[in-house]
Amino acid sequence: MATPDNAPLPHKGGLPLETAAAAGFFLTLIVGLYLGQGIFVPLVLAVLLAFALSPVVAGLRRVGLPNVVATLVAVLGAGVMIALVGYLVVTQLLKLAGDLPQYQSTIAAKIRSFQMTAGSEDVFERLAQAAERLGEQTGLSGNKPGTEGNPLPVTIANVPPSPLASVQGLLGSLLGPLATGAIVTVLVIFLLLEREDLRDRFLRLVSRGDLRTSTKVLNESAQRVSRYLLVQFLVNAGYGVVFGAGLVLLGVPNAVLWGLFATLFRYIPFVGTLIAVTIPLTLAFAVDPGWTMLAGVILLYLVVELTTTNAIEPRLYGSSTGLSALAVLVAAIFWATLWGPIGLLLATPLTVCLVVIGRYVPNLAFLEILLGSEPVLTGEQRFYQRLLARNTEEAIDMASSEVAETDLPQFIDSIALPALRLAEADLQLDGSDMGPRRAIVETLSDVMDELAPSETMQSELPGAGKILVIGGRTELDAAAAEMLSALLKQAGVEVSQLPPMSARREGLGQIDLSGVNAVCLCYLGSSPKSFVRYAARRLKARSAETGILACLFNVASSDADFMPADLGVDAIARSMKGALTQALTLLGGADDAGSEAEPPSGVGQLEALRRLQRDTRYGGWLDDFLAKVAATFEVPLATASIIERADSSAEEPPPPANLDATSLYEQVGKQGSPLVIEDVAAHEHFRENPFLLENGIRFYAGVPLLPESGQPVGTLSIFDVAPRQFSVAQTESLQALAVELMSRVQTSAPADR
């Protein structure tokens, strides 16, 4: 096929222009960070300290201190804390230096004991002599030069430096850290004093008109970094206290110093604690003539480290950073390479900011994928991938874990069926490749054999009939039918399964319906109405007494307003759990097929309530009653709703954050118990509910409307625009009004039918 003159030539090699530009940008950024570390390191340190001190400043301002005073108090407090830590470190180091000479003989004795135990005199003798010589040269040995056996060494030394040169050398070594500390302190003060103005300028710079997303990025970054710094400080401080206290009990010298070192070195990922424990181990080896202290230090370190790493940090850090363990390791290597030891301390906070930015900036989404701790594939996607890859072992392991946490129907509804929907979507795009489809069906069959083995499916219900399950059109429908068959067999039902060919025109006339009480037609397609209607009509023509259940498993694309009469079936289900319930219901009523079914108790009240809502003759009575309910609880609005969908009891409710008004009422009706939300904005599940948020609702209470049968038919609800307390007695009063409403419906409405 010829290429038009103005069409771009196909890309044959090399990097696309956008990818090359992005790579060049990141390379330039890395070089700039490396060359400009003298500028960026103090700035980043100041920003992180500002994040850590912002809650303190905010708390001081809430108690009435002015902004300047609160900022200075917070910075001064942090400075005093750092100075105290420094003082403790220096004093403990001086004490350690004074105690070192008495440890030399213990080390030499232990080396000789090794020599006697190992039988190798040369090596250990040389080590012992080296230890003694080291003590003599450093002045730690008890033998003095010039005594017998220790001749006075003759050395040629240069002229010692003048006092001025010594002072200059000392100041030169301290000037750099002192200057950096001063710069960081000044920056922290200004960042805290001007944080509102700096935040506004930053938002104006990066928002490009999208203040909502930019504010989200800024707030989440600040929240995560602040929480991480606080949690890290508490964990490290607790680690140091416990480790230091354990060393005190073991008798290790200068235990306070090693506890402080453990706290400080834990800021270095992965290797910090190993560095911190090295000196206490060496001291335990040098101080104790035996091995008890050394073994105790090793045991103490293992217990504290393993407990902190495996039990405490995963619970606290998991929600505060959002980083994977590999990301923390790679970040530590990257920032340490760029900025040295200080980069180790800054690695995690900086990477947290990158992950948050990647979450909200589409072009940088790869950062969250590579570095974040959240799963990048949903449960159904992971299961679908295992099926595609024929990875039966991992698929069974994943399915077994899910079933152990919930149950088999829940696993099928939440994982297996969504995976089949993904396969169905791929089938619509390209149905010519049969390999993946075959892999999905065969692997899923192996999984179901493992989860629901045949030997557990042989107990039939006494007197129960038989159910025929048919996959509607494709082998994916047949896979869904196999899962439903497994659930029915586990319920003790006699089940037969037929392939999709049986649901075609030529196959429907050959199905043996003798002894069959119900037929389940399973479909995953996006437009199953015509197929279901045709199959149901043919099956009803052959056996009018046989109940037909349409299982429309593609919930996302199936019309939610389908009614059984629209398709010519007896019931509809859109989930596997709903299909199981509906199939057992059809099976239970099969013995009375052909006779007029008596409507369940409460249907008359449901219809009466529906008429009260839509009929103006009764609307005034209902409005007066609801006004009475609102006045009783001093709220602006009360409503009485009904459950509209006939099969809603078999469906899983949507998440609370996605509930509209109807779904909210139905959830109360389905659970059959009151639902009270005293403050919507503070509720864990309902604070982002669009219906409640858009209508300015801050308080909700609802109780089910229960007829004589006990099956809820609706909900009596009250709303308020302000949060409020709602006692148990008030809930019982609302339930009493719901009973009164159902009583008045029963006595008043049916008279005008």
Image (cartoon, grey):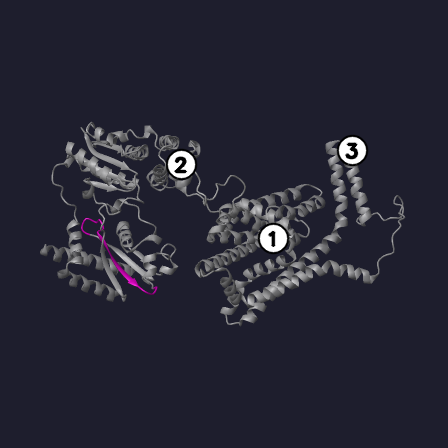
Query: Please, what secondary structure does the residue beneath circle 1 have?
Result: helix
**Residue type at mark 3?**
Glu
Report whether residue 520 is seen.
yes
Name the front one of labels 1 and 2: 1
Residue 186 coordinates in the image, percent (x, y): 62, 66
As for residue 462 lying within the magenta part, the answer is no
**Looking at this view, is 209 or 407 the one in front?**
209
Q: Is residue 666 left or right of residue 315?
A: left
As for residue 717 lying within the magenta part, the answer is yes
Q: Vertical placement of 175 versus 554: above or below?
A: below
Name the front one of labels 1 and 3: 1
Q: Which residues are magenta?
A: 707-723
Residue 728 found in image quarter: bottom left
Q: Is residue 150 left or right of residue 52?
A: right
Q: Vertical placement of 25 versus 722: above or below?
A: above
Q: Residue at x 50, y 60 (%)?
A: 206
Q: Quadrant of the N terminus?
A: top left
Query: Please, what secondary structure does the residue beneath circle 2 have?
Result: helix
**Residue type at mark 2?**
Ser
Label whose residue precedes the other's in the sequence (1 or 2): 1
Q: Residue at x 32, y 32 (%)?
A: 475
Badge 3 is on which residue? Answer: 121
Q: CA distance from mark 1 to mark 3?
A: 46 Å
Label whose residue precedes the other's in the sequence (1 or 3): 3
Query: Please, what secondary structure does the residue beneath circle 3 have?
Result: helix
Residue 705 coordinates in the image, percent (x, y): 22, 54
Badge 1 is on which residue? Answer: 345
Badge 2 is on which residue? Answer: 400
Q: Are marks 1 and 3 in contact (CB under 8 Å)?
A: no
